[in-house]
Amino acid sequence: MTTTVRTRVAIVGAGPAGLLLSHLLDRAGIGSVVVDQRSRDDIESTIRAGILEQGTVELLDTLGPVSRARTAGHRHDGIELRFEGEGHRIDFAASVGRAVWLYPQHEVLKDLIAARLDRGQDLRFGVTAERIDDAGTDRPRVIARDADGQPLEIEADVVVGSDGSRSVARATVTGSSKGGYFREYPFAWFGILCEAPPSSEELIYSNSPDGFALVSQRSDTVQRMYFQCDPDTDTAAYSEAQLWDELQKRVPGTELKQGPIFQRDVLRFRSFVAHELRRGRVALVGDAAHTVPPTGAKGMNLAIADVRLLAAALEALLLEDDERLLDAYPATASRRIWKAQHFSWWMTSLLHVAPDATDFDRRRQIGELRTVVESEHGRAYLAEAYCGWPSDA
Ligand code: PHB
């Protein structure tokens, strides 16, 4: 027996994009159903990136005390770029009068899920979307299986695919699950979480002859750090002592505070933008639409920027029968998507050592780093992009 649910907006994927969209729609009086294949526990406990742009925090603020980004997060007014053994601070406040907040994505998710369930809104875990039918009509349907494996159909005015980089919705929109502009990188990040105090007040992005390292944070007692590695690296191949050696040699000049390492993972790098972001009444947001390498900390922020645009477009469509903003959504969203793609690619190429880099390449890269840190305008470009462009740019 197939259960059929009817709603105005069916949202596939309960990541930050899907959940935030459901809140913004709810505020405008538009109902939605959000489904996700994962369990609540899975979603809330997966460790992900942690930097929120100022505009992201401002948008989350509009949800009220539900969002703890500003109160429980930490404001960062700068980052350090380190190369040739020296640190160079990029002062966001001085350059662009803006800041970022360190507030991990899973905390954002906890806030949004709790708020959604508190308000008695329809959020279903363990639901696997199989495909989306009738995208070209004004009654698109999500064909799914519920947590017990029973067939479920969600009939809506609009379906939104916020279902991440392995999106099912993408196939409906682009005609194939892979259809997009794509770039791979010959390196990855080895990430660790450890129990230790912070090694530095601000994040350190370090370019060293041994490769890139990033010293980030999670809290006063848990730290997140990464070092550049081969994409095929086996996380079990390193002892804890070897991991500290790898990290430490890439951050000369700062003695890393060590502690037990309780999680390790390898993050592969990809740049991707789907060829299409919308087909009829089905639209893509977040990682379903695009992926960036993590160096610029843009992933979640870009997803939230998509949602800001799409929420306005769906309000116009569903409350005023005006389809113009939805028609414009792919072109409007693409402007920021490609700026973020460029910035993420640029930060990646600026800071990593390519496996086939020549002496010339290394020296050129140091020249590029100096061009940035020794110029007010260079620092301002980085600061502006890192803290996030205005919402209409
Ligand atoms: C993180 O804390 O996980 C993090 C921070 C900055 C980045 C990427 C990841 O650019």
Image: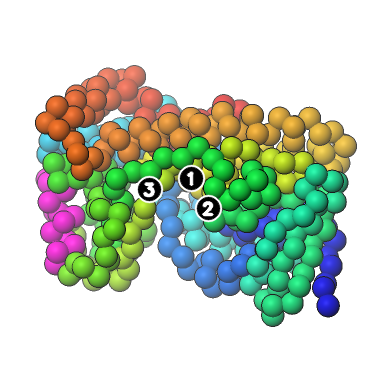
**Image point (11%, 31%), residue name:** 359
Dot 1 or dot 2, earlier in sequence:
2
Q: Which residues are magenta?
A: 241-255
Q: Are marks 1 and 2 in contact (CB under 8 Å)?
A: yes
SS for tag 2? loop
Residue sitting at the far front: 176
- Residue type at mark 1: give it: Thr
Judge left or right: residue 3 versus residue 168.
right
Q: Distance of mark 1 from mark 2, alpha carbons? A: 7 Å
Q: Residues within 10 Å of mark 3 (few under 14, many from 20)?
A: many
Image location of residue 40, percent across then percent down: 58, 71
Circle 1 — which element? strand
Side (left or right) of 353 relative to 333: left
Q: Label 1 belongs to which residue?
A: 291
| Residue 39 in the image, given as x and y percentages of width and height | 58, 72
Q: Is 82 situated above or below 379?
A: below
Q: Position of residue 276 (x, y in %)?
A: 63, 38
Element marked by disc 3: strand
Q: Which residue is mark 2?
A: 165
Q: Marks 3/2: CA distance? A: 12 Å
| Quarter the N terminus occupies | bottom right
- Tell me the residue at 30%/71% (across/down): 262
Question: Would you identify the image quadrant in which residue 206 lies?
Answer: top left
| Rendered position, 145 above or below 317 | below
The residue where tag 3 is placed is: 269
